[in-house]
Amino acid sequence: MLAGNDGERVLPKMKLRVAIVVLLAVASAFSHASPLGPDGQAGHFHPGKFIWFDLATDDPAGARKFYGAVFGWRFRQTDGGPSSYMIIEHAGGKVGGLFFHARPPRAPVGSRWLSLMAVRDVAKTASEVRQRGGEVVLAPVTVPGRGTHALFRDPQGAVFGVLAAVDGDPPDNAVDDGEVFWLDLFTTDPSRASAFYSGIAGYEVSESDALAGRKRRVLATEGIARAGIVALRPDTFGPGWLPYILVDDVHGTLKRALAAGGKVVVEPRADLLDGNLAVIADPNGGVVGVVDWLPREKAEGPVR
């Protein structure tokens, strides 16, 4: 499990109102995004596990160039799917998807990552979201070869997706370099966020020490930690989910990101996993974390 970062510096500096406008606009494209989903295991489901990640961008060619250079990802056109949608792959299999979406007027960024949580019943989850103070941004949509998905906004404003995958959920195997290893929700109200997500996904919530003097609430299902919740300082940045990619060399990854035109949002620091954690932005503003967990997990690799 990832062990912390400096929350108020992670997300791009923008007003919450602008961030919500961008994500609402992205939702319309998301509803038609992918005819394919994760490499699921038929008949096996892991509600609460984050199983898919979509990058919406107004510069797909630039995104492919950047992420290919930084993480070695490959991009494959889907068979029978929209021409703008591509599957992101690496040596171990699928990472997620990438699709074109025009930048809304006055939007400060042109790329946005969307994280999708596994659920068994999307319509029921939508009802739970409403009852618990969230909002349905994209109503449930069924896509052949993928399953049923929807997009929601939690009570603090963070946008996330859910997916009932037609082929089942990916197994809880060890994570390879280049895959999403962990997610943190940065929010102004961790207590309310914990109650919201445990209510809709059945998470068990515990508290652990994060780094840089922070606490993290850990969301777990089936005895496996799935994600964390970290406090944002009020009036700093808008709440949001941040995925972290597992790498074998954080400093080398940052060099590749800078050479490819990206930015370092959070520099490696001694109090952030001994310098083995950072956050980067692609040239179009899409933000992801990078983490080398192996220094602390030599005996047994991470599981997601």
Image (spheres, rainbow, N blue to C red):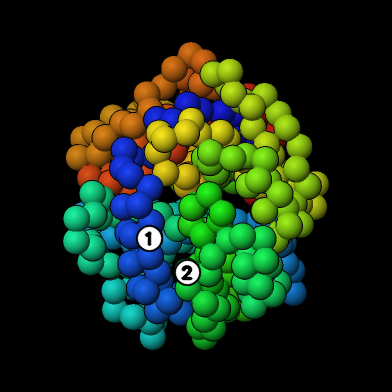
Give x and y (percent) for residue 2: 60, 33
Residue under the point 72% across and 53% down = 198
Q: Which one is in front, 254 or 152? A: 152
| Residue 126 x %, y % | 62, 71
Q: Label 1, on which residue?
A: 23
| Label whose residue precedes the other's in the sequence (1 or 2) | 1
* Residue at 53% in and 38% down: 188
Which amino acid, mark 1? Leu
Residue lying farthest to the top in this orientation? 270
Q: Quadrant of the N terminus?
A: top right
Residue at the image position 21 percent from the left and 35 percent from the top: 259
For numbered disc 1, what is the local secondary structure? helix
Q: Using the image, determine if residue 53 lies above or below residue 67.
A: below
Q: Secondary structure at mark 2?
A: strand
Horizontal relation, residue 298 to residue 14: left or right: right
Asked whether the beta carbons under mark 1 and mark 2 sit within 8 Å of each other, the answer is: yes
**53 versus 124 height, above or below:** above
Q: Number of numbered discs present? A: 2
Residue 268 screen position, x and y as percent: 41, 22
CA separation in Å, label 1 and label 2: 9 Å
Q: Is residue 33 visible?
A: no
Question: Tag 2: Cα neighbours inside 10 Å, few (<14), some, or many (≥20)?
Answer: some
Circle 1 packing at 10 Å, graded few (<14), some (14-19), many (20+), is many
Figure quadrant of residue 278: top left
The three-letter amino acid code for the residue at tag 2 is Val
Tell me which residue sits at (59%, 46%) in the image. 175
Per the image, the residue denoted by label 2 is: 137
Residue 18 seen in render: yes
Q: Which mark is residue 204?
A: none
